[in-house]
Amino acid sequence: MFSNTDVAIANEVLRWARESLATPTEKMRRTRAGPPEAVCPFVKPSLENGSFYIEIHHEINGQRPEPIMELMLKHTETFRRLPPFEESAQQKKAVLAVFPEIPAHEMPVLDLVHEQIKTRYMQKGFMVTQCYPGCDMRSKRNPELRVYDSPWPLMALRLMAIHDILFVEDNEDWFAAFNARFGQKFRDPGTLKDYEQPLLEEYIKARARFIR
């Protein structure tokens, strides 16, 4: 059940998603001569499909990471219970858990939660990220973009996609989970779609870091 305050919070999150994540910007070009693109290619399809879900958790105060970790690990099952259920539409689904009671000085707890749960998420075929006001994490494509600076502290989950090779960083477990799902496509580059071809170099570099 939403209160009027919750509706206002959800509307702020939706506005941020539309304006900051889903609207093409001159600062995001995935190829050198390409057109302006959205920061996150998943948000607009999710919004248009009516499968951009927001859940507000007033019970979370951010004083300890464990309650947030427990909640977020349960959300992978919540995700599966929400429509759409067709395999072709699963990538359009996103779930955001918003924590309006976390005060500003406690918000970095979400960084810790992300670090602790991301491996288990990826092993299940999901991606998770943290966003909060003042978050200084930058876009992988353009460090000028502080894409995780949201109006409220939150964590977002969606299904893993092939472009998530950009987010395995220097973590061997993250790469292993990604490689188990998408490695075969990169080992046979002829199966890659045109828009996936630029990811091949990222995969080769990541594979070299972890596979000798």
Image (cartoon, rainbow, N blue to C red):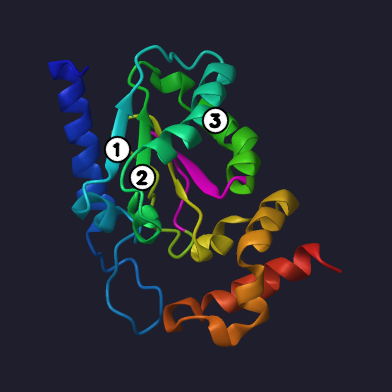
Q: CA distance from mark 1 to mark 3?
A: 16 Å
Q: CA distance from mark 3 to mark 2?
A: 15 Å
Residue under label 3, please give it.
73
Q: Amino acid at mark 2?
A: Ala
Residue 119 appears left or right of 154:
right
Q: Residue 45 location, x and y as percent? A: 26, 58
Q: Quadrant of the C terminus?
A: bottom right
Q: Is residue 125 magenta?
A: yes
Q: Tags 3 and 2 in contact by the CB under 8 Å rule?
A: no
Report the span colored magenta. Answer: 124-139
Q: Residue 76 location, x and y as percent? A: 49, 36
Determine which of the numbered discs, if any, sits on residue 53 in the image.
Answer: 1
Tell me the crowding category of disc 1: few under 14, some 14 to 19, or many 20 or more residues within 10 angstroms, Cα based: some
Residue beneath the point at 48% across and 46% down: 137
Residue under label 2, please give it.
94
Q: Is residue 112 magenta?
A: no
Residue 152 appears left or right of 193:
left
Q: Residue furthest bottom?
A: 190
Task: Answer yes or no: is residue 131 visible.
Answer: no
Q: Tags 2 and 1 in contact by the CB under 8 Å rule?
A: yes
